[in-house]
Image (cartoon, rainbow, N blue to C red):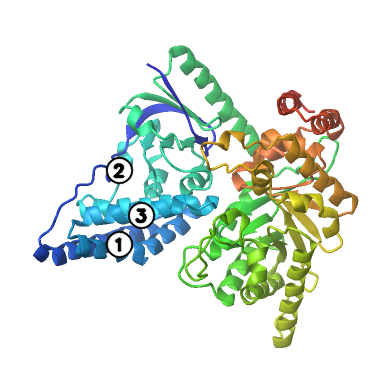
């Protein structure tokens, strides 16, 4: 019987193949009560599993294929770092001693406790980091059971293999790059998980967050993976199989045509220049930018330099990271968002307690202003890096003009500190504000005399406008980027900034969604920033669009307050060739 499963599409494309189920290793962990004399030996067994896991991860990091995604090495380094954290390397030893239990049970107990803590977080990125903890724990567990090493042998897999598993780790990806598999699907994960990021980087059709795929799919069963729609079809009917074979051919042809526009200018049919930029999270991500078709970095999420470590990165560490990106892009723009940390993005070194509602707490620019010494250290690092390339500074979560003025005052203070010690920097460095709170969008006109550019963060703007947590399964279906209230806020921001001659970009997920490109163009957007993998698809839509032709439909969409009517008009907008 055919089964249809729905999840999160992350890799794009369509694959048809045979299922290969990867073994579950932490299911049904037994609890064994130890005699007092056995505790020390059990702790030694746990310590050896930690050492063996570290050796494996370091070996894998040293053998990453040259054509692997740039993120892979960074993620393996993160797993090695997690392995050294006391929560995984030491606290299970204490559980073994206090509960006199076997190491497997102690490890699982500690892992379950950490997962509960991650699940209580509101931040998308940090919530997804529980999967990194689970992946490292799985590898320790395999070594405890004597099954460490490779998860699978690449030469045993074929190019029509669909990997089916509960989760995949960055370490596993080293093998997949060599194996030339067709696709993968997982039960867990989210849009910001490392599995999702690597799926996009590997350019494999992939669907994650399927919940029960591992239980429902049998070994060697025929599976369709629709990485475009986020659908997995198990044991498809002949007619469905034939239709998806047609779609797969069409997708391959579409990709082939997209590669032709890599070096083409992103101009509309009427000759309007559009700027396409890339979003990055780590300095190593910059390697993907030149080949993506992007002309620079529109959003460098600098908080990733601050997370997953026991100490605050020094000014020198930050300077080196920003300089690396600036020099790699050889004069192309690099927009760096200052640290968007806060209550739920709470590194150990920050030492702040959790709040009742972290999303409304001390986060973004609020935290930066509450910690001026830490803030100025980052600003000095950014200013120094501006001597090596075109750095732009972007302030996150600005709520109103007083916050913006305070941030600018701190920037001037940082400049004065550098002048005093003789460090060179770009005196005319461009500064911008993120519009991701409805209040900021409504009063955006007050910002315009104080900034060089604006950037609309649609992910948070949608959540704050609609009061919806897109990670909450109970309400995630209500997360709607084309809700009339969201469109009115975006349109107002673009129109107000454009009138004043202030460039404005969109750097949230909407910018990389080719279905929304014509809508944003019709609203007046001329600068898009997105994941590098999305650039070519958006560029193709830009080149196929005539602004005069789409204007009437977009105007009707902005006048409407009926979500269904807007959805129908969007479909009409995208159906018109060379609109």
- Which residue is at the front of the view, 238 or 188? 188
What is the crowding at mark 2: few (fewer than 14 residues within 10 Å), some, or many (at least 20)? some
Q: Residue at x 18, y 65 (%)?
A: 44
Q: Residue under label 3, please give it.
A: 113
Picture quarter with the N terminus: top left
Element marked by disc 1: helix
Residue 546 falls left or right of residue 286: right
Count of picture labels: 3
Q: Is residue 66 above or below residue 553?
A: below
| Residues under numbered marks 1 and 3 in contact, where contact means CB atoms less than 8 Å apart | no
Q: Label 1, on which residue?
A: 55
Instruction: Tell me the distance, in whole angstroms, between the alpha carbons under discs 2 and 3.
Output: 29 Å
Dividing the picture into quadrants, the one containing residue 383 is: bottom right
Q: Is residue 303 above or below residue 16?
A: below
SS label for mark 2:
loop
Residue wearing tag 2 = 152
Q: Residue at x 45, y 56 (%)?
A: 75
Q: CA distance from mark 1 to mark 2?
A: 18 Å
Q: Identify which residue is drawn at 45% across, 57% down.
A: 73
């Amino acid at each position: 019987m055919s089964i249809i499963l729905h999840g999160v599409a992350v890799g794009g494309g369509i694959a048809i193949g045979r299922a290969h189920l990867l073994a579950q290793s932490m299911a049904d962990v037994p609890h064994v009560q130890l005699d007092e004399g056995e505790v020390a030996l059990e702790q030694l067994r746990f310590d050896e599993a930690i050492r063996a896991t570290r050796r494996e991860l370091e070996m894998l990091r040293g053998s990453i294929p040259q054509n692997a995604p740039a993120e892979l090495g960074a993620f393996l380094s993160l797993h090695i770092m997690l392995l050294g954290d006391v929560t995984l390397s030491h606290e299970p030893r204490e559980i073994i001693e206090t509960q006199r239990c076997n190491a497997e049970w102690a490890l699982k107990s500690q892992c379950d406790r950490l997962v509960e803590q991650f699940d209580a977080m509101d931040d998308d990125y940090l919530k997804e980091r529980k999967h990194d903890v689970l992946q490292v724990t799985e590898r320790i567990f395999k070594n405890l059971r004597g099954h460490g090493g490779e998860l699978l042998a690449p030469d045993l897999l074929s190019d029509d293999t669909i990997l089916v598993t509960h989760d995949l780790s960055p370490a596993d990806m080293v093998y997949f790059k060599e194996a030339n598999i067709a696709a993968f699907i997982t039960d867990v994960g989210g849009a910001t998980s490392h599995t999702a990021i690597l799926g996009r980087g590997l350019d494999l059709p992939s669907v994650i967050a399927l919940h029960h795929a591992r239980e429902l799919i049998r070994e060697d069963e025929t599976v369709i993976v629709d990485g475009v729609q986020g659908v997995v079809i198990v044991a498809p009917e002949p007619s469905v199989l034939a239709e998806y074979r047609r779609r797969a051919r069409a997708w391959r042809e579409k990709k082939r045509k997209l590669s032709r526009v890599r070096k083409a200018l992103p101009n509309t049919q009427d000759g309007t220049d559009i700027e396409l930029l890339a979003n990055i999270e780590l300095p190593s991500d910059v390697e993907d930018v030149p080949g993506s078709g992007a002309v620079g970095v529109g959003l460098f999420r600098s908080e990733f330099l601050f997370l997953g470590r026991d100490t605050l990165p020094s000014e020198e560490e930050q300077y080196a990271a920003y300089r690396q990106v600036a020099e790699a892009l050889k004069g192309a723009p690099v927009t760096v968002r200052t640290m968007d940390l806060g209550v739920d993005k709470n590194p150990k070194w920050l030492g702040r307690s959790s709040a009742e509602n972290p999303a409304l707490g001390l986060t973004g620019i609020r935290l930066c202003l509450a910690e001026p010494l830490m803030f100025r250290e980052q600003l000095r690092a950014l200013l120094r890096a501006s001597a090596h390339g075109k750095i732009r500074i972007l302030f996150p979560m600005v709520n109103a003009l007083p916050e913006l003025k305070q941030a600018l005052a701190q920037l001037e203070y940082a400049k004065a500190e550098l002048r005093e010690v003789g460090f060179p920097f770009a005196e005319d460095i461009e500064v911008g504000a993120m519009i991701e709170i409805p209040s900021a969008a409504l009063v955006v006109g007050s910002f315009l005399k104080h900034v060089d550019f604006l950037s609309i963060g649609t992910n948070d703007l949608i959540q704050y406008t609609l009061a919806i947590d897109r990670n909450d399964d109970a309400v995630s279906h209500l997360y709607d980027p084309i809700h009339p209230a969201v469109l009115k806020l975006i349109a107002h921001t673009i129109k107000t900034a454009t009138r004043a001659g202030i460039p404005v970009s969109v750097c949230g997920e909407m910018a990389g969604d080719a279905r929304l490109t014509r809508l944003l163009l019709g609203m007046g957007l001329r600068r898009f920033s997105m994941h590098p993998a999305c650039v070519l698809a958006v560029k193709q839509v830009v080149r196929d669009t005539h602004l005069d032709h789409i204007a009437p439909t977009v105007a009707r969409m902005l006048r409407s307050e009926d979500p269904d009517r807007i959805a129908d008009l969007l479909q009409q907008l995208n159906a018109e060739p060379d609109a």
